Image (cartoon, rainbow, N blue to C red):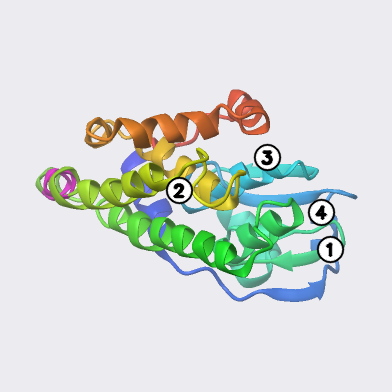
């Protein structure tokens, strides 16, 4: 059923990614990477892996978006080292795992990580806040439990967690003089924040919690409308679920 599928996907989204493999691909994994491209494997959902797609799009690097449905996972799973996604195969055949590590690697390759150490740290801190603290607060109530538990989870987000995290992002945006969160050009921190705000704005029960933070919404919309990201979003397939 749809409920069972969502519960299964959400459980997978909550699992920590498996360890990285730095060995070059061998059969059958060698067939996974298109020559000269980064090949990215993740469910046909946004979830924990969507921000990597935004970063890949903005980077200008050649890449292929390999999405799969829940029913395909059991067949695909044994062919992926570590049996976990997100999963990236580089043009050289290296197999990368761990969401934030993949994102940072791609961002560096695409010039989206500042060369200044302190600025790079600020990006790391922003991404950790959004992808660890904020994301996990959302995923706690996404599994389909009883309607009462779901309603309580949505209420908690709308009254407590949402204002807390949107307030943090709002402060980052207001402190910026350039329109970007770190420095005077787009970084992977901007893309990560905008992606999560965009995704949460698609969940009917909690999207209104963004309305009190117009600067946050405007910031996310501005990043989403930047050339290469906008091109990706125009052709992005509809996911299995809202989030």
- Image spot of residue 239 (x, y percent): 49, 35
- Image height check: is 178 above or below 25? above
Disc 2 on helix, strand or loop?
Answer: helix
Q: Which residue is mark 4?
A: 33
First in residue order: circle 1 vs circle 4 = 4
* Horizontal side of residue 95 vs 192, given as left or right: right
Tell me the distance, in whole angstroms, between the alpha carbons under discs 1 and 2.
Answer: 25 Å
Disc 1 on helix, strand or loop?
Answer: loop
Tell me the distance, in whole angstroms, between the alpha carbons under discs 1 and 4.
Answer: 7 Å
Q: Which residues are magenta?
A: 149-156
Q: Which residue is mark 2?
A: 47
Q: Residue at the spot x=38%, y=54% of the render?
A: 10
Residue 57 image label: 3
First in residue order: circle 2 vs circle 3 = 2
Tell me the distance, in whole angstroms, between the alpha carbons under discs 3 and 4.
Answer: 17 Å
Q: Nearer the viewer, residue 201 or 188?
A: 188
> Dot 4, how many residues are within 10 Å of its Cα: few (below 14), some (14-19), or many (20+)?
many
- Image spot of residue 52 (x, y percent): 59, 50
Q: Residue at the spot x=89%, y=49% of the render?
A: 36
* Horizontal side of residue 210 vs 76, given as left or right: left
Q: Which residue is mark 1?
A: 93
In this view, the mark in front (2 or 3): 3
Disc 3 on helix, strand or loop?
Answer: helix
Considering the whole magenta stretch, tell me its main secondary structure: helix
Cβ atoms at labels 1 and 4 below 8 Å apart: yes
């Amino acid at each position: 059923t749809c409920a069972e599928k969502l519960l299964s996907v959400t459980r997978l989204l909550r699992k920590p990614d498996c360890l990285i493999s730095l060995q070059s691909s061998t059969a059958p994994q060698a067939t996974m990477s298109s020559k000269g491209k980064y090949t990215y494997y993740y469910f046909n959902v946004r979830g924990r892996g969507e921000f990597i797609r935004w970063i890949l799009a903005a980077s200008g690097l050649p890449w292929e978006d390999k999405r799969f449905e829940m029913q395909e996972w059991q067949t695909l799973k044994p062919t992926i080292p570590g049996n976990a996604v997100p999963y990236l195969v580089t043009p050289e055949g290296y197999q990368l795992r761990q969401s934030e590590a993949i994102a940072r690697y791609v961002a560096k390759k695409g010039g989206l990580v500042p060369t200044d150490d302190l600025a790079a740290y600020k990006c790391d801190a922003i991404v950790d806040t959004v992808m660890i603290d904020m994301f996990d607060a959302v995923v706690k109530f996404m599994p389909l439990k009883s309607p009462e538990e779901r309603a309580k989870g949505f209420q908690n987000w709308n009254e407590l967690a949402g204002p807390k995290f949107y307030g943090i992002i709002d402060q980052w945006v207001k402190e910026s003089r350039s329109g970007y969160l770190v420095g005077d050009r787009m970084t992977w921190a901007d893309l990560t924040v905008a992606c999560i705000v965009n995704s949460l704005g698609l969940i009917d029960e909690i999207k209104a919690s963004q309305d009190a933070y117009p600067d946050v919404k405007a910031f996310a919309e501005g990043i989403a409308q930047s050339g290469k990201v906008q091109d990706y979003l125009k052709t992005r397939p509809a996911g299995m679920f809202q989030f």
